[in-house]
Amino acid sequence: AQTVTQSQPEMSVQEAETVTLSCTYDTSENNYYLFWYKQPPSRQMILVIRQEAYKQQNATENRFSVNFQKAAKSFSLKISDSQLGDTAMYFCAFSTNAGGTSYGKLTFGQGTILTVHP
Amino acid sequence: DADVTQTPRNRITKTGKRIMLECSQTKGHDRMYWYRQDPGLGLRLIYYSFDVKDINKGEISDGYSVSRQAQAKFSLSLESAIPNQTALYFCATSDGGQFHEQFFGPGTRLTVL
């Protein structure tokens, strides 16, 4: 079974600065996907960024980028030029690309609450 | 209009009551999921369905049941609610495609007194 661990329950950052959220995972699979989801106070779950394990290049979406270290099973999220609207709970999630009933199921970490201060 | 809707958005009920949470989607996806979110635990999978005739237990299915009435509808029932089922419940859908992305509903806040 896969596990996902987010060791930072809370983080804070000043507006316009950079912050990195940590995530580690454990799996015996070689082919999988990793995700960061954002949950603002509205409760809506919003996909921020996705990384395919077979790709060595780190994914980037505007101000959001990841540092994917496959051997270390680490998947951190970097938010550059933080904005007040980035204040939210952030979840790291894993999905295996192997066949069978586990295919496509998401396993989530515990979440990190990020607060951006003006 | 939202692609994935959940009703009710908030519900307060009493111990022992039967309650149903409903999920509807207009995305045309075959796969639907029910999760619960608890502080410090993230989201955990309760049940999932890959099509109308396929229902599977997730990691925390005890005390819950589901019904897939149609491709677009997936309901979660608590037969006899208990206080530790107080949580935020999410429905999600997926097309099972290459990237495994799931699309979430707005969530239902359930409180069991």
Image (cartoon, helix red, strand yellow):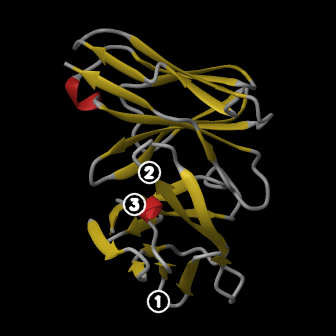
User: From mark 3 to mark 2, how far is it between C-alphas?
Assistant: 7 Å
Q: Residue furthest front?
A: A118
- Looking at marks 3 and 2 on the same chain, the residue that comes earlier in the sequence is marked by 2
Secondary structure category for the residue under label 2: loop
Name the amino acid type tagged 2. Pro
Name the amino acid type tagged 3. Thr
Q: Is residue A114 left or right of residue A95?
A: left
Asked whether residue A87 appears in the rendered view, the answer is yes
- For disc 1, the marked residue is A72
Identified at 69% across, 65% down, the residue is A97
The x, y position of residue B11, in whole percent, is 36, 18
Secondary structure category for the residue under label 1: loop
Which mark, by number, is residue A40?
2
- Looking at marks 1 and 2 on the same chain, the residue that comes earlier in the sequence is marked by 2
Q: Do the residues labelled 1 and 3 touch (CB within 8 Å)?
A: no
- For disc 3, the marked residue is A87
Identified at 33% across, 76% down, the residue is A14
Query: Closest to the observer: B5 or A54?
Result: B5
Q: Do the residues labelled 3 and 2 touch (CB within 8 Å)?
A: yes
The x, y position of residue A54, in whole percent, is 71, 81
- Looking at marks 1 and 3 on the same chain, the residue that comes earlier in the sequence is marked by 1
User: From mark 1 to mark 2, how far is it between C-alphas?
Assistant: 29 Å
Q: Do the residues labelled 1 and 2 touch (CB within 8 Å)?
A: no
Q: Which chain carries label 2?
A: A
Task: Indicate which label's residue lies in the foreground, 1 or 3.
Answer: 3
Q: Mark 1 lies on which chain?
A: A
